[in-house]
Image (tube, rainbow, N blue to C red):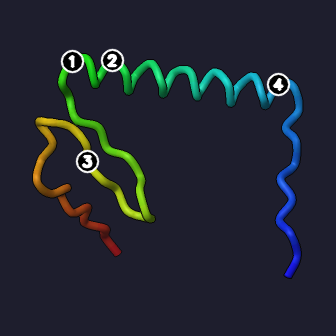
Amino acid sequence: MSARMTPTPDQDTQAMLDCLRQIVTTTLERKRRLGQYMVIWQNNTPVVVGEDAPSELPKIVQQP
């Protein structure tokens, strides 16, 4: 087996990643303060978290 190498992003790419992380963190914190639920990815499946979260996520119908 070979070890998986993760390339080091260049300066512009790293700045974009940092900005996206900051926006996501800010948005999730705002939703938490407002008491809104959020959808996260866990164990290869979407999961809803929060007091007002629906009991099930709606199924997305994919058309052929």
Q: CA distance from mark 4 to mark 3?
A: 33 Å
Residue 46 lies, in percent from the top left, at: 34, 56
- Residue 12 lies in quadrant: top right
- Residue 52 lies in quadrant: top left
Name above or below for residue 8 compared with residue 34.
below
Point out which mark residue 48 bears. Answer: 3
Looking at the rendered structure, the kind of residue marked 2 is: Arg
Q: Which residue is mark 4?
A: 12
Q: Nearer the viewer, mark 4 or mark 3?
A: 3
Q: CA distance from mark 3 to mark 1?
A: 16 Å
Instruction: For the C terminus, give its image quadrant.
Output: bottom left
Q: Which residue is mark 1?
A: 34
Residue 44 lies, in percent from the top left, at: 44, 65
Looking at the rendered structure, the kind of residue marked 3 is: Val
Q: Which residue is mark 2?
A: 30
Secondary structure of the residue carrying numbered label 1? helix
Residue 18 lies, in percent from the top left, at: 67, 25
